[in-house]
Amino acid sequence: MNIIVVKTEQEIGQKTGDLILNKVKENPKAVIGLATGSSPLSTYKYIIENSKKENVSWHDITTFNLDEYKGLSGIHNQSYRYFMTHNLFNHIDIQKENTFVPSGMIESDDEVKVYDEKIKNAGGIDIQLLGIGVNGHIGFNEPGTSFDSLTSVVDLTDQTIEANSRFFNDKSEVPTQAVSMGLKSIMNAKEIVLIAMGENKAKAIKELVTGEVSTDWPCTILQNHPKVTLIIDEKAASLLD
């Protein structure tokens, strides 16, 4: 596991953005796994600016997002499809039909199983971007999630709902379920980069790096992946030796 500690959110965006952009330059038909939330915003800003500056084309790139809120359509302003469209896809030359986000309007697991098939048919994810929850969740895989899990409908913990309520007018508006890539889905990526910032992520980062591999901390599964890079700020790294 490669651990890069930086001082600022801007540096996280730069280093993470360069990893992703280098993958796009190396393979113009690469498959990129993407994440949402506040953590990757600096990364997407850097990617947009430098794709234009360096004339990097995303025309033949395919992307798969980790998750989506169940019950929100792609045009809802708190959906992850909406987030990706407005924070990245509208600003690079990617073909929208090559950008995949789980549908929040599905009714059963049977409808979401096709997501892993789509990823497989695209050749697998070359690099997957992850954030991390304070309880160690990656994607929306909460503590207790099986390490063999694939994309499915998942229940969100009250802690996660509370953390995400800052994006909504009221906590009662936050969906209680999501459609998320499973832990096995994530581990199938050829390379993983995880970003974290802030003191509230320090415990999760410590467990990820030095804790026992356990479903109590879903992030610890990454210890079993051959190519993981952590890009974190000093506060998130504060409990590491």
Image (tube, helix red, strand yellow):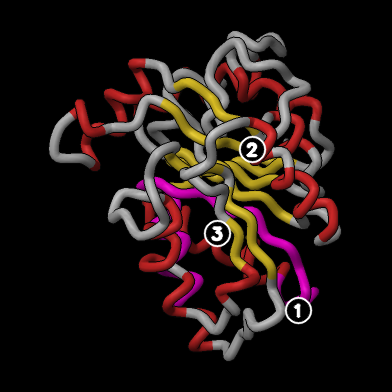
Give the image location of residue 144, x and y in percent: 60, 10
Give the image location of residue 76, x and y in percent: 31, 54
Residue that carries the numbered disc 2 in the rendered image: 181
Instruction: Identify which residue is drawn at 46% across, 18% down.
Output: 135
Q: Say whether disc 3 or disc 2 marks the residue closer to the N-terminus.
A: 3
Mark 3 and mark 2 in contact? Answer it, CB < 8 Å. no
* C-alpha distance separating marks 1 and 2: 24 Å
Looking at the rendered structure, which numbered label has been put on residue 28?
Answer: 1
Identify which residue, 182 or 16, lies in the foreground. 182
Residue that carries the numbered disc 3 in the rendered image: 15
Q: What residue type is labelled 1?
A: Pro
Q: Say whether disc 1 or disc 2 marks the residue closer to the N-terminus.
A: 1
Q: What element carries label 2?
A: loop
* C-alpha distance separating marks 3 and 2: 25 Å
Indicate whether 59 appears above or below 159: below
Instruction: Identify which residue is drawn at 42% across, 23% down.
Output: 134
Q: Is mark 1 on a helix, strand or loop?
A: loop
Horizontal placement of 80 versus 121: left or right? left
Instruction: Identify which residue is drawn at 14% across, 39% down.
Output: 169
Q: Say whether disc 1 or disc 3 marks the residue closer to the N-terminus.
A: 3
Of labels 1 and 3, the one closer to you? 1
Q: Is residue 22 magenta?
A: no
Q: Which amino acid does label 2 sit on?
A: Met
Of labels 3 and 2, the one closer to you? 2
Q: What stretch is highlighted in magenta?
A: 24-49
Neighbor class of circle 2 (other Cα within 10 Å; few <14, some 14-19, many 20+) is: many
